[in-house]
Image (tube, rainbow, N blue to C red):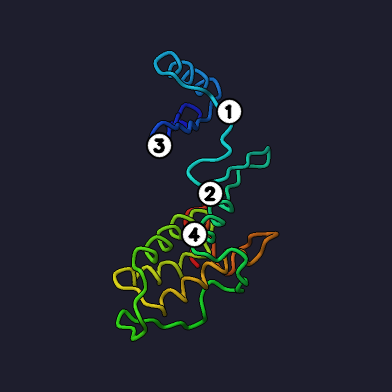
């Protein structure tokens, strides 16, 4: 299979994202879809499922700053003091914490949102993965740790650079990472 002849269509309910190496193939596909379904072409992708997409000649970048702001707002942490790291160094938590329980639905909602945010914030992978372990019966201790992750979301307003992390590339393609 040659990439130039490949067409990938991402479908979510009634939204389509079309990716391909040949602009003619993309146009042909759009015309066939328009002939079969009532649809409109919104042009280049700018926003899709919480991902903000910026396309230029030098490449494509994604970010989720609006999505991150919604998470902060939902957690009641707009304007919180930022932390330098998403988790305390050597933090040790237990499922059998003696601190009072918190609303598990709220905790799960925040952790789930953070897991989706990891699409563009790879530096959160370790801390969110660690705090995911306590979804069954979270306590105040676990919620405090989650709030630390949330207050790191605005740690560097200008560059949005990762706190820590390693990226592995094969050629120019990112294949895996760790944080």
In the image, which disc is placed on residue 43?
A: 1
Element carrying mark 3: strand
- Marks 2,4: beta carbons within 8 A: no
* x and y, in percent, of residue 37 in the image: 40, 18
Above or below for 64 versus 16:
below
Q: Which sits earlier in the primary sequence, circle 2 or circle 4?
A: 4
Q: Residues within 10 Å of mark 3 (few under 14, many from 20)?
A: few
- Distance of label 3 from label 1 (alpha carbons): 17 Å
Residue drawn at (47%, 76%) of the image: 144
* x and y, in percent, of residue 83 in the image: 60, 73
Above or below for 173 versus 165:
above
Task: Indicate which label's residue lies in the foreground, 2 or 4.
Answer: 4
Element carrying mark 1: loop
- Distance of label 4 from label 1 (alpha carbons): 31 Å
In the image, which disc is placed on residue 74?
A: 4
Task: Indicate which label's residue lies in the foreground, 3 or 2.
Answer: 3
Image quadrant in which you'd find residue 95: bottom left
Q: Residues within 10 Å of mark 2 (few under 14, many from 20)?
A: few
For the image shown, how many numbered marks are present on the structure? 4
- Determine whether, in the image, residue 105 is placed left or right of residue 122: left
The residue at which mark 3 appears reads as 12
- Distance of label 2 from label 4 (alpha carbons): 34 Å
Report the quarter where the N terminus lies.
top left
Towards the viewer: 174 or 31: 31
Image quadrant in which you'd find residue 141: bottom left
Q: Which sits earlier in the primary sequence, circle 4 or circle 3?
A: 3
* x and y, in percent, of residue 117 in the image: 49, 56
- Distance of label 3 from label 2 (alpha carbons): 25 Å
Above or below for 46 versus 95:
above
Q: Which sits earlier in the primary sequence, circle 3 or circle 1?
A: 3
């Amino acid at each position: 299979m040659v990439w130039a002849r490949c067409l990938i269509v991402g479908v979510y309910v009634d939204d389509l994202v079309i990716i391909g190496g040949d602009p003619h193939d993309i146009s042909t596909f759009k015309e066939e879809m328009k002939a079969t379904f009532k649809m409109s072409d919104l042009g280049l992708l700018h926003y899709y499922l919480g991902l903000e997409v910026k396309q230029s000649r030098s490449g494509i970048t994604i970010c989720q700053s609006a999505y991150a702001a919604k998470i902060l707002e939902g957690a009641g942490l707009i304007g919180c003091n930022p932390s330098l790291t998403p988790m305390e160094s050597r933090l040790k938590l237990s499922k059998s914490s003696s601190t009072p329980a918190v609303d598990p639905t709220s905790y799960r909602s925040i952790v789930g949102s953070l897991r989706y945010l990891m699409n563009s914030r790879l530096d959160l992978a370790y801390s969110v993965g660690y705090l995911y372990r306590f979804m069954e019966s979270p306590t105040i201790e676990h919620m405090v740790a989650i709030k630390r992750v949330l207050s790191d979301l605005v740690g560097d307003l200008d560059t949005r650079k990762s706190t820590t992390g390693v990226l592995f590339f094969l050629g120019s393609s990112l294949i895996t990472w760790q944080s």
